[in-house]
Structure formats: C-alpha cells, structure tokens
Amino acid sequence: MSLPVSRGRLRGFYEQPPAHANKASGSGSSTAEVQPSAMPKICIGGIKSGSIQSAGMKIRFWGTRGSIATPGPATVRYGGNTSCVELRAADGTLIVLDCGTGAYGLGKALTQSGEPVTGNLMIGHTHWDHIQGFPFFDPLFVERSNWTVYAPGGGDQRLQSTLAGQMAYEYSPINLGSLMAEISYADLTEGVFEVGSVRVTTQYLNHPALTLGFRFEVDGVTVVYACDHEPHSLHPLDAPAGAEPIHHEDRRHVKFLEGADLIIHDAQYTLADFPAKAGWGHTPLERAVDYAIRARTKRLIFTHHDPDRDDDAIDALCAVARERAATASYTPEIEPAAEGAFIELKGDKKVRRGSLGSDSSALLAVSGRGPATVLIVDDDPDMVLLLEAALRADGIRVITAEDGETALRQIREKRPSLVLLDMRLPDLDGMKVCKMLRAETDPGLRDIPILILTGLKLTEADLVEAFVAGATDYLTKPIKPTLVRSRVRSWLLRTVSP
Ligand SMILES: [Zn+2]
Ligand SMILES: [Zn+2]
C-alpha cells in the first residue's frame, strides 16, 4: 500500500482514458454500438467549479463496480473501480457520492492545482466497496481543505470510528489522525438537508447494512443515487414492465425516484439470479427498469456492476433492459454506468422543485437516549436466538414471546419500540395479533411498527393481507440476520423520537 500524498505522480492517469470515456456526454446511445478503436483520446479531470454552466448539475462517474474492484482488459469500457460519483452544482458545491476505489482518480483530479478543496462526501453505507478509497482520497491530505463526511448513523458518532477502523495500524500505514484537511462528520437519517444550493433528501434503502439513498435537487434538476438496494419484495413476479409494486416500501422507493431527470441505480443482479441472491441487498436490473418506468424518470443509469460481469455481459444486460422498457407506455433512456462518463444536466435557477415528504432534518443530533426495546414473537427457539443475537449486536434490548397472547401482554406491559412478529403462531396467529394491536385506542400501542416474519412461501395475497392487517413491513424466511438488523435499525430511527 503506498501513501496517497505524492500528488502529481499519476497526473497523467487519465491521459489515455478507458475507451468508453467519450460516450459520456450523454446522448443515451448504446455503449454496445461504440467501438473502442474509434474513440479519440481525451483528458479527464475533475469537474471544475468555474467550468459549470449557469444552472444545473454536472456528474462524472469514477467508480461503477460493486463489491470488489475488477480492473483488467474485460472491464475497460465500464470500469473496474468501486463506487464513486462526482456531482457539481452551478454554485460550485461539490458532492462526492461514495468513496470506493474510484475516489483515488477523483482525488488526483481535484488536487491537480495544489489548492485546498472544499467538498461534501456522502457515503450511502460503509461496506468496503464504498469506503476503500477514503484513505487514498488526496483532498484529505491537503491543508486548509475542508470536508464534511455524511453517512447513515444513529446519532452515536460511530462514523468516525468506522472510517478509522479501516485505517488501523494492522491495515494501513496512515491513520485518520494523519489527514491534514479539516474534516467533520455528520450522522444522517431519513429527511432533508441542504449543502450550498443543493437540497438533499435521504431515504433508507434495503441492504444488509444501514444504507441511505440520496435525492439531489437544484435549479429544477433532480438526480437520485440509490445504491445498494434490494426490493423489499419482488412481487408482482410476472407483472408487465412498470407495474406497481405490492410492498409498501417498494412503492415508497418509487416515490423517492419520482420525476427525476436521472437515477443512478443499483442493478447488480437480474431476476434470474434470484432467489440465490435474495438478501444480498441488490436490485435485479428488471426491477430497476420497472422503477424508472413507474417513477417516470427521464434516464436510468444502472450501476454497481457485478464483478463477475465483463463489458460484453453488461452490454447484453443493457439490451435486455431497453427491450423491457420498450414494452411499457413510458420509456426512459437506459445505459450502464461507465467509469469516466460525464453528464451535464442543464437547469433553470428560477425553478424550485419541492422535495418529497416531510421537511424534517436528515442531520441527527448526538443522541442521549438509551437502547430501544424490541419484542421478538416466534415459537421457533432457533429463530429467536438468531434474531436476538442480530439485534443485541446493535445494542438493542430484546424481549421475547412464543405465542400471540403472551405477545399482546408483553406489548401492553413493556411498550416495545418495535415488534418482530411471526405469521404462524400457536392459537392466536400473527395476523390476528397485528389486527388486535391496530385496534387499540392508545396510540402508543396502536402505532408500534410491526415487522411480520413468515416462513410461508410468499404470495401476493399474503403481502396484501399483511398490510391490510396493519403490518408496517414484511420479511420472508429464510432470514439473513444482517438484513433484519439494518431493517430494524432503520425503522427504529424513523419512528423513535430523538
Ligand atoms: Zn456496494
Ligand atoms: Zn453494501
């Protein structure tokens, strides 16, 4: 591992860019049609604030790969670096989305002049493919640079220690304290905040780590970044392209994307990869297409490419996605994210598009609250043990019940912040418990979030029945403890007052 302080050493890094680079400015034309040999050599740098148009946003992709970096001849067109996207508003506001290995090239470009750099680093979650570039991000080594690092958190100030963890002595020759920039850290939850002229709305995604998606609005231009995310349910399974999802959280996700000029969306897998990839926290490409259609977004750039897919495989996926979109009454432009690609979205300073939902702040204050209590209701002792371990690891106080009657008594006596409720229970089943709780007159009981768990083979009718009964959310066994943990955490952060 070399230190990232030798700025300029790789100044010519992009003088001979990946061959895909010039298709970037965004005609939406098929990358499959572009022959690398026909491409002129162009120089790619960071987006300069002085070069911005009078209104709108500029976007450049620096890392498009999911899970692990995969450099090599088979990935030269779409890129081998992990997640990193540069976004620049007309007022010069710089936002860096994720800090995978792609951040290395971006950092070099940003520091070419040797001047300090001010920016905002927004990390969707802290899995390695989203933070591995952090210790190699040059602006952090420039004195008088000023950075705010945002990531989902619980008001417990763990972000700094998480980033310090990957820079510990055992893993890295430099530690967090060696960085010369002024760095501040911000824990985010769902809500809204502003950086410069950009209004940012955040919403939880479904991933085996607490993860946020970001919606950016400026000068009438909207861009959404949703990476990494698995549909809460794939239902309806055989529906035509653009069909409305059944799970409430999937509908909410569509709302989050609604009307965007551009969505940069996870599409690591395909429907054919499921159910083997269920619980891994990624979107099948077909569903990313459906969301773009349903949300009437102008353009979908699918990203977080699977490390097992080479450029040709990604071209083939893109063809499938376009074919699917062509069958719908509304057809967004679709293309794969390509490392080096550059997009300019022209806006109008006079247009102010309202953001979604509530105006509550996404910035979490340091929390002084004690651990939340969660009730696990399941008659399978092995499942209880598994869930208990997952939640305790997150500092949650756990109480348990084996049947519906005991569950109702526990809820009334101990008022948990959330209930994990198995559908099949002896005597009083989960659906009945759910209905009885929703019929309570006391809002403190009636409004407790309920996550239904089921070992049944999920059907569309089950989902509908659970939501009619008053379920907040729905999880199907076999359950991945990491996914339950992040799902519970996101519901607690949404519903527990600070
Ligand atoms: Zn990832
Ligand atoms: Zn991840």
Image (cartoon, rainbow, N blue to C red):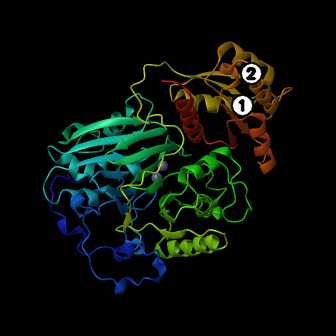
Q: Residue at x 80, y 41 (%)?
A: 465
User: Is 274 on the left-hand or right-hand side of 115?
Assistant: right
Which residue does the numbered mark 1 point to in the structure image?
421
**Label 1: how many residues lie within 10 Å, few (<14), some (14-19) or many (20+)?**
many
Relative depth, front residue between 392 and 433:
433
Q: Is residue 445 above or below residue 452?
A: above
User: Is 79 on the left-hand or right-hand side of 383?
Assistant: left
Residue 446, numbered label: none
Q: Secondary structure at mark 1?
A: strand
Q: Are marks 2 and 1 in contact (CB under 8 Å)?
A: yes
Q: Earlier in the sequence, mark 2 or mark 1?
A: 2
Q: Is residue 484 above or below residue 199?
A: above
Query: Hey, which residue is sitting farthest right in the picture?
Result: 427
**Is residue 133 visible in the rendered structure shown here?**
no
Which residue does the numbered mark 2 point to in the structure image?
407
Q: Is residue 476 above or below residue 105?
A: above
Gap in Å between the C-alphas at discs 2 and 1?
9 Å
| Residue type highlighted by circle 2 | Ala
Relative depth, front residue between 307 and 361:
361
User: Is 133 on the left-hand or right-hand side of 447?
Assistant: left
Q: Residue at x 32, y 41 (%)?
A: 149
Relative depth, front residue between 374 and 23:
23
**Is residue 451 visible in the rendered structure shown here?**
yes
